[in-house]
Amino acid sequence: MKYESSPRVIGIASGKGGVGKTTVTVNLAAALVRKGFRVMVLDADLGLANAQIGLGCQALGNLAQVLRGERKLEEIIVSAPCGVRLVPGTSGVRDMAALDRAQVAAIIHAFSELDEPLDFLLVDIAAGISPSVLAFLGACQRRFVVACDHPASIADAYALIKVMSTEEGLDEIHVIGNMAASQAHGHHLYGRLNQVCNRFLGCSVGYLTAIEADETVQDAWRMYQPVVEYAPSSSSARDFRRLATIVSEMPLMPCASGRVQFFMERMLQTAEGA
Ligand SMILES: Nc1ncnc2c1ncn2[C@@H]1O[C@H](COP(=O)(O)OP(=O)(O)OP(=O)(O)O)[C@@H](O)[C@H]1O
Ligand SMILES: [Mg+2]
């Protein structure tokens, strides 16, 4: 089966842990579904996967089984109540937390067999700058960096951008300010980060929007739901819907093939070069 157009593949990373990658991933996914798009989340945080908690679905299999050849990718995909499709990661499996680039390439290769029409594949990336983090990011068409107004978050976001742009040759990097006191604060945070990138890396990063700090986000996690479903009138849900509008209006990236293997070509080159 051929898709009419290729899915758009976006990696969501941060460098520092705990700044909201999974929250952004599940809520952007749910907000895009509400707009009528077909969306899949790949939980690529293979040490401590928790997208299934945020989406409220029960994983029946995991990527470790796919990697071992025990199950096919399509056999482990589950649907969340909000309509997002999820490829569950693994939690507490130490070998999966430290995959090398070739193993990541094998996971991504499995996507070329997938016959499911999709508009977006959102990849929830682990914290850090390990080889598997960079391999997943290299396979995406765009990379979103989640940062919050904390010195360690800004330092780690910069470190990640530095490695992506100078060592991996990656572009299409866009910042999301999370847990912001206001939209203006989020934009200011981006301005500081972009200034450092300009000055020391000679590159610019894009800006998407800010997601305000909102306790409802935590309440939604406790209810195993994205906040856009749990509390659509909350400030964070409003921000996630704005993010979804911005993301859906970004220009399509040129792609040689119409299948999920979009990610493939660049990915395999990266694996061979490793
Ligand atoms: N906009 C927000 N307002 C308030 N709390 C938030 C917001 N975004 C995320 N959080 C909270 O921050 C915590 C970390 O979020 P999340 O798990 O999404 O981060 P992460 O970057 O995926 O973490 P990890 O690196 O462990 O994967 C959660 O308790 C979540 O509820
Ligand atoms: Mg996470």
Image (spheres, grey):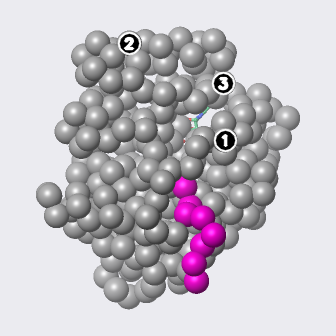
Residue 235 at x, y percent in the picture = 77, 28
Going by the image, does 69 lie left or right of 35?
left
Residue 210 at x, y percent in the picture = 61, 25
| Label 2 vs 3, first from the N-terminus | 2
Q: Quadrant of residue 158?
A: top left
Q: Residue 249, which numbered label? A: 1
What count of labels does the image hold?
3
Picture layout, residue 102 above or below residue 141: below
> The C terminus is located in which quarter?
bottom left
Q: Residue 212, which numbered label? A: 3
Residue 240 at x, y percent in the picture = 69, 37
Q: Callout 3: 10 Å neighbours few (<14), some, many (20+)? A: many
Residue 5 on the magenta span: yes
Q: Which residues are magenta?
A: 1-8
Instruction: Report the amino acid beneath label 1.
Output: Glu
Give me the C-alpha separation between circle 2 and circle 1: 25 Å
Give me the C-alpha separation between circle 2 and circle 3: 22 Å
> The N terminus is located in which quarter?
bottom right
In the foreground, 155 or 262: 262
Q: Please indicate, yes or no, whether residue 228 appears anywhere in the rendered image.
A: yes
2 vs 1, front mark: 1
Q: Please indicate, yes or no, whether residue 219 appears anywhere in the rendered image.
A: no
Going by the image, does 208 lie left or right of 32?
left
Residue at 42%, 27% in the rendered image? 205
Q: Quadrant of residue 170?
A: top left
In the foreground, 158 or 199: 199
